Image (spheres, rainbow, N blue to C red):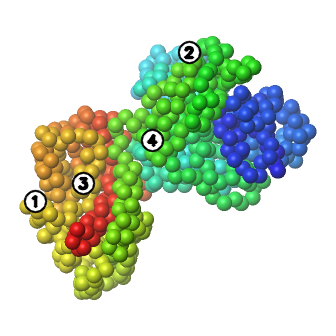
């Protein structure tokens, strides 16, 4: 069994110890210096995290198999270099590689050199020069001390007075030591954290997370080391994640190898989703805190294997992460991040049914006392953000201490009523369908069956079709995928549709659009039997919809209305504006909303003074295929915004028809793109297939 030494004594290290305790390979864990909570899972060693020689001597005496470094301070003093020189295995970056965090200027120069997206900047060591530069530019100004400052060396100055005070503190008073200041362009958009295990050019990503730096609710008050964090970020898409991994984390790993400073630990990207794309706010050379406390509980792989592989440079399997959401809230001493008292007794922790990671605690006999600014973090897991949020705040109520406070709005980006999470809602619908399909199979002796036809090799269509077939299989339906060549004739396609129309084992037929130019889409849609038209595009289905007769409702409009229902808005008497008049989305949505007693206005992307029209909308549905056409100032405050558009920008990124970052600040509810309407369309397709099945069996 392996002996492991973890260096550090905060919540991050407690989460690392907790993850190591789940490894079947680890027999004994030491932590230097540790804390009162860590002591329940590891033997605490009274050696400071920056005492390189003391830690090295301890590791040698105890025959430690692997050392894991938590805090940046230990990395910056060269602990990894010393351990490796002594022939000991250690997880963490060398002093040279740690410079990606320890020097803001180094990181900015690196990003400039290797084309990693970040804000523009200039560096200064002279107070007057820095002040003149800042005052000549628009506010707010981003000022960063070029060095380690325990997460407190960044000031976003709203005006000249704040900027002067910050520059004076950093350059004249040397609040963090003698150093330079980096002045950056101010960026807007939601921030998030992307961590990865990195060994040279090998990058193993972790789940995305978002922390909350401000001390008080509503993102008010001074910056802190972090007051809470969560995973499962609804404002980011899979395309965002892939872009960040490939163009930021992997690019940075390659850049550090090229600079002769290869990484061998955790690379933390503090990133922002700006209107012009994802950009780097900062790099850290270690696990983030409090992000580690919400990310590592999701790890299903053996973390010892990962640590040891990175420490030795060997290949390892891609880490496996549980598909769940975690949310954690920090309890801090009153007065933090300013002056605060220590020694207050904490009661009730033993009754908490969630993970409790200690940050600043100590024992006095049987009594648990506060011993720091951030004291502990309670982390709960749930099937979605709301579930995890409810659990964690219920458990927090069990902890009693007069000298502790915590934020009550962690994950407000996802919970403040602004995100209509189509992924979460569609997942719920699919679970219900899975149960329903199973019961239908027992009752009728067969399962609903969906046939999907794709013609050609359109990349987007290939993705959509795979997702549709995969979903059909997941809910338990029979599915049939029929592929036809790009040069297939219209007659061949019509013949295939005719065969499926007559097949008694097929309940639903879907032809993936768009079709190659030699095929008449209208004729193809018309050829699908009305009773098997699961997309709801058949002319008779569209006519029946407007006549109020039973029909298959088109999938996307049906999903849009379900998303609006999810917001809780009563449509009666409300004004809905639909920008986009297509027969596939615009007109069916208009009919469905009219049936809910809404006043409906239909507009076009070229409607004169479109802004005056959209500002009337209590519900705004946009489906025109023009990137970021609807800006924030075109959204009525408190409106529900449904963005149907998915557009690919010249640099390969995806965006919607609505400027999401801008509009979400005015909307009461909004769908992210992609991720809002798309998953719902597929869920509605499955629901329509079941309904076609029921109609055919006479139920």
Give the percent coordinates (x, y) of residue 687: 30, 62
Say the numbered circle drawn on residue 548: 1
Between discs 2 and 3, the one toward the N terminus: 2
Between discs 1 and 4, the one toward the N terminus: 4
Q: Secondary structure at mark 3?
A: loop
Horizontal relation, residue 205 to residue 692: left or right: right
Say the numbered circle drawn on residue 387: 4
In 3D space, how far apart are the residues under numbered discs 1 and 2 (Cα atoms)? 62 Å
Residue closer to the observer: 446 or 323:
446
Q: Quadrant of residue 570?
A: top left
In 3D space, how far apart are the residues under numbered discs 4 and 3 (Cα atoms)? 32 Å
Label 2 environment density (alpha carbons within 10 Å; few <14, some 14–19, many ≥20)? few
> Residue placed at 49% from the left, 51% from the top?
241
Q: Is residue 329 above or below residue 64?
A: above
Between discs 2 and 4, the one toward the N terminus: 4
Residue annotated with mark 2: 402
Q: Is residue 375 above or below residue 110?
A: above
Q: Is residue 397 above or below residue 304?
A: above
Determine the residue located farthest toward the front in the rendered image: 443
Whether residue 532 is visible here, answered yes or no, is: no
Label 1 environment density (alpha carbons within 10 Å; few <14, some 14–19, many ≥20)? few
> Residue placed at 69% from the left, 30% from the top?
37
Q: Secondary structure at mark 4?
A: helix
Q: Quadrant of residue 443?
A: bottom left
Quadrant housing the C terminus = bottom left
Q: Secondary structure at mark 1?
A: loop
Between discs 3 and 1, the one toward the N terminus: 1
In 3D space, how far apart are the residues under numbered discs 1 and 4 (Cα atoms)? 38 Å
Say the numbered circle drawn on residue 623: 3
Tag 2–tag 3 contact (CB < 8 Å): no
Task: Nearest to the eye among marks 2 and 3: give it.
Answer: 2
């Amino acid at each position: 069994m392996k002996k492991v030494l973890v260096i550090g004594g905060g919540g991050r290290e407690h989460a690392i110890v907790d993850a190591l305790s789940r490894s079947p390979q680890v027999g004994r864990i030491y932590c230097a210096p540790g804390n009162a909570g860590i002591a329940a899972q590891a033997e605490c060693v009274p050696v400071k995290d920056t005492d390189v020689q003391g830690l090295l001597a301890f590791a040698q005496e105890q025959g430690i198999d692997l050392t894991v470094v938590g805090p940046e301070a230990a990395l910056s003093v060269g602990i990894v270099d010393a351990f490796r020189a002594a022939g000991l295995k250690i997880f963490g970056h060398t002093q040279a590689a740690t410079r990606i965090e320890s020097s803001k200027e180094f990181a900015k120069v690196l990003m400039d050199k290797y084309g990693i997206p970040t804000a523009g900047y200039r560096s200064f060591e002279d107070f007057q020069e820095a002040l003149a530069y800042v005052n000549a530019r628009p506010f707010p100004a981003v000022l960063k001390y070029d060095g380690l400052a325990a997460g407190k060396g960044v000031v976003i100055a709203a005006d000249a007075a704040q900027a002067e005070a910050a520059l004076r503190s950093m350059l004249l008073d040397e609040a963090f030591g003698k150093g330079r200041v980096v002045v950056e362009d101010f960026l807007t958009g939601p921030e998030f954290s992307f961590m990865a295990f990195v060994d040279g050019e090998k990058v193993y990503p972790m789940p995305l997370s978002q922390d909350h730096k401000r001390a008080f609710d509503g993102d008010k008050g001074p910056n802190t080391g972090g007051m809470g964090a969560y995973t499962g970020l609804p404002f980011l898409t899979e395309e965002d994640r892939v872009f960040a991994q490939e163009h930021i984390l992997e690019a940075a790993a390659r850049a550090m190898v090229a600079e002769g400073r290869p990484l061998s630990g955790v690379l933390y990207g503090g990133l922002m989703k700006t209107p012009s794309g994802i950009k780097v706010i900062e790099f850290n050379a270690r696990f983030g805190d409090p992000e580690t406390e919400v990310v590592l509980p999701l790890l299903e792989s053996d973390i010892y294997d990962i640590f040891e592989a990175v420490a030795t440079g060997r290949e390892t399997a891609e880490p496996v992460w549980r598909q769940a959401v975690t949310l954690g809230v920090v309890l801090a001493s009153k007065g933090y991040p300013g002056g605060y008292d220590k020694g207050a007794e904490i009661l009730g922790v033993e009754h908490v049914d969630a993970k409790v990671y200690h940050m600043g605690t100590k024992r006095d006999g049987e009594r648990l006392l506060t011993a720091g600014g951030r004291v502990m973090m309670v982390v709960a897991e749930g099937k979605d953000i709301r579930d995890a949020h409810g659990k964690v705040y219920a458990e927090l109520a069990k902890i009693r201490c007069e000298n502790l406070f915590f934020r009550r709005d962690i994950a407000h980006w996802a919970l403040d009523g602004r995100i209509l999470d189509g992924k979460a809602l569609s997942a719920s619908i699919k679970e219900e369908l899975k149960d329903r399909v199973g019961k239908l199979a027992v009752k009728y002796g067969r399962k609903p069956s969906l046939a999907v036809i794709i013609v050609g090799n359109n990349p987007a269509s290939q993705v959509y079709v795979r997702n549709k077939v995969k979903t059909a299989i997941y809910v338990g339906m029979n599915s049939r995928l029929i592929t036809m060549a790009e040069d297939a004739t219209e007659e061949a396609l019509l013949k295939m549709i005719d065969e499926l129309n007559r097949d008694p084992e097929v309940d639903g037929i879907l032809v993936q659009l768009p079709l190659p130019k030699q095929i008449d889409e209208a004729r193809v849609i018309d050829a699908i039997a009305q009773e098997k038209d699961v997309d709801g595009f058949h002319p008779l289905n569209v006519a029946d919809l407007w006549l109020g007769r039973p029909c298959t409702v088109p999938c996307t409009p049906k999903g849009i209305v379900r998303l609006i229902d999810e917001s809780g808005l009563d449509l009666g008497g409300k004004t809905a504006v639909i920008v986009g008049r297509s027969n596939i989305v615009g007109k069916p949505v208009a009919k469905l909303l009219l049936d809910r007693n809404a006043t409906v206005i239909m507009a076009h992307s070229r409607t004169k003074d479109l802004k005056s029209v959209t500002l009337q909308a209590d519900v705004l549905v946009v489906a025109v295929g023009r990137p970021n056409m609807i800006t924030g100032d075109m959204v009525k405050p408190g409106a529900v915004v449904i963005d149907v558009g998915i557009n690919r920008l010249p640099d390969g990124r995806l965006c919607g028809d609505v400027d999401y970052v801008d509009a979400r600040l005015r909307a009461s509810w909004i769908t992210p793109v992609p991720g809002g309407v798309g998953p719902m369309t597929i869920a509605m397709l499955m629901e329509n297939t079941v309904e076609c099945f029921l109609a055919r069996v006479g139920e």
